[in-house]
């Protein structure tokens, strides 16, 4: 199972205009057999609205970098013979599941699209104006009043994509996150021997026997001060928010592995106590660099659900790691109830669709 190669864009600003409503008509019937037929001006049609919809086969907001302005059409004006103008079609903006929409001017949350098929109205079309036939009464039989169509809403919106994954790989730069993702899934992240090789999140589907799968996110490396935006910290923290389980990757060639774990935990806790309380486990990477017979370092991690030493280069411990991750993910899914099941269905549909693409 694999992913298409694509540029990852996780935040865009989009301007939307809903359509203006059509004007009502001012008209009077003129027939040879009805010399005084009365008012027959029809109503204008409603302007098109703008909706945002989560679509399963999308995984990035890249399209909105090329087109950041979207406008719905206006409604058709009313006509004589009581003919109502046609309403304009709505505009649907597709986004990946996991997209959050905020109003740029007010900062208020407009909507959050977690599952494929979720939809939110972001700009309402203008109402069509009434024609003069609408103003007829027993005492006002020849009205010349009519209404203009209402204006459609105009807004500047911020789309932010927060990845939906089961496991988030957390570690300092060059901790082996990308390498691990590449060997437990078909994802092909960039791998090199310098810091911040990963400049954007990568996703992969880890497959086990019995058709068991879970989604893993490789997040840009975290450094001290990440919670305040240093390095790629905010990008890391934004995407790790929606992962069910955190896997802290600790390279065994580090001078002080225990201190590295404490640094990572500290940054996550400063960003969000709720995030720090997520289930997590320890993954000791680069075991192949330890001399034969060496003991693993002792790490005080009372909140961890387990630990495993691995080598992505030699494959040592990878099966054990996948089974451990699977068991933890399953335990978390079971506690989520129906909401978790819905998220699973949306995620499975998303990755099944992406995997089928060439």
Image (spheres, helix red, strand yellow):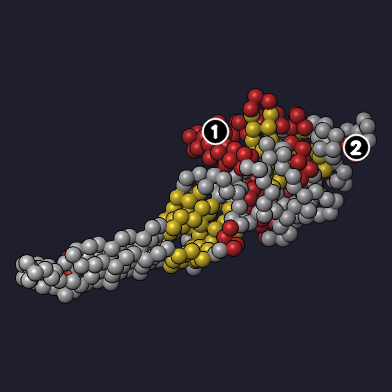
- Return the x and y of residue 205 as percentages of the image width and height: 67, 38
Q: Nearer the viewer, residue 85 or 355?
A: 85
Q: Nearer the viewer, residue 203 or 67?
A: 67
**SS at mark 1 in the image:** helix
Query: Residue drawn at (50%, 49%), measured in percent from left and top?
Result: 54
Residue 279 appears in view: no
Asked if marks 2 and 1 touch (Cβ < 8 Å), the reply is no
Say which quarter of the image contains residue 317. Answer: top right
Pointer 2 local density, CA inside 10 Å: few below 14, some 14–19, many at least 20: few
Q: Which mark is residue 335?
A: 1
Query: Residue drawn at (55%, 49%), measured in percent from left and top?
Result: 96
Query: Residue drawn at (25%, 62%), measured in percent from left and top?
Result: 84
Q: CA distance from mark 2 to mark 1?
A: 38 Å
Left or right of 41: which side holds 238?
right
- Return the x and y of residue 334 as percentages of the image width and height: 55, 31
Left or right of 111: which side holds 136?
left
- Return the x and y of residue 132 as percentages of the image width and height: 18, 70
Pointer 1 local density, CA inside 10 Å: few below 14, some 14–19, many at least 20: few
- Return the x and y of residue 326 as percentages of the image width and height: 66, 31
**SS at mark 2 in the image:** loop
Q: Which mark is residue 192?
A: none
Say which quarter of the image contains residue 333. Answer: top right
Q: Find disc 2 in the rendering and name its residue.
A: 290
Q: Quadrant of the C terminus?
A: top right
- 305 w.r.t. 224: above or below: above
Upstream in the sequence, badge 2 or badge 1?
Answer: 2
Q: Quadrant of the N terminus?
A: top right
Left or right of 305: which side holds 158?
left
- 236 w.r.t. 311: above or below: below
Query: Residue drawn at (46%, 57%), measured in percent from left and top?
Result: 110
């Amino acid at each position: 199972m694999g992913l298409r190669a694509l540029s990852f864009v996780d935040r865009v600003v989009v301007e939307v205009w809903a359509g203006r409503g059509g004007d009502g008509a001012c008209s009077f019937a003129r027939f040879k057999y009805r010399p005084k037929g009365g008012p027959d001006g029809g109503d204008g049609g409603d302007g098109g609205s703008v909706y945002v919809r989560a679509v399963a086969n999308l995984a990035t907001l890249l399209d909105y970098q090329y087109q950041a302005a979207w406008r719905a059409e206006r409604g058709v004006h009313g006509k004589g013979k009581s003919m109502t103008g046609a309403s304009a079609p709505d505009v649907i903006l597709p986004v990946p599941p996991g997209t959050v929409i905020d109003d740029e001017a007010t900062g208020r949350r407009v909507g959050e699209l977690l599952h494929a098929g979720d939809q939110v109205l972001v700009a309402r079309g203008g109402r069509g104006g009434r024609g003069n036939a609408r103003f007829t009464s027993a005492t006002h039989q020849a009205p010349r009043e009519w209404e203009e169509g209402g204006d459609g809403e105009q807004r500047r919106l911020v789309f932010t994509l927060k990845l939906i994954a089961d496991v988030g790989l957390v570690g300092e730069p060059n901790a082996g996150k990308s390498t691990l993702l590449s060997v437990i899934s078909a994802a092909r992240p960039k791998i090199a021997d310098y810091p911040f090789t990963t400049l954007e999140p990568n996703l992969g589907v880890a497959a086990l026997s019995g058709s068991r799968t879970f989604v893993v996110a490789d997040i840009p490396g975290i450094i001290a001060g990440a919670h305040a935006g240093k390095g790629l910290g905010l990008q890391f923290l934004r995407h790790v928010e929606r992962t069910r389980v955190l896997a802290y990757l600790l390279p065994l060639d580090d001078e002080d592995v225990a201190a590295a774990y404490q640094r990572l935990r500290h940054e996550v806790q400063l960003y969000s106590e709720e995030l720090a309380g997520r289930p997590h486990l320890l993954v000791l990477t680069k075991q192949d660099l330890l001399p034969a017979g060496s003991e693993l370092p002792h790490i005080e991690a009372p909140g961890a659900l387990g630990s495993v030493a691995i080598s992505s280069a030699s494959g040592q411990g990878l099966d054990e790691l996948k089974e451990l991750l699977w068991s933890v993910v399953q335990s978390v899914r079971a506690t989520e109830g129906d909401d978790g099941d819905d998220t699973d269905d949306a995620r499975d549909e998303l990755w099944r669709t992406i995997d089928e693409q060439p």
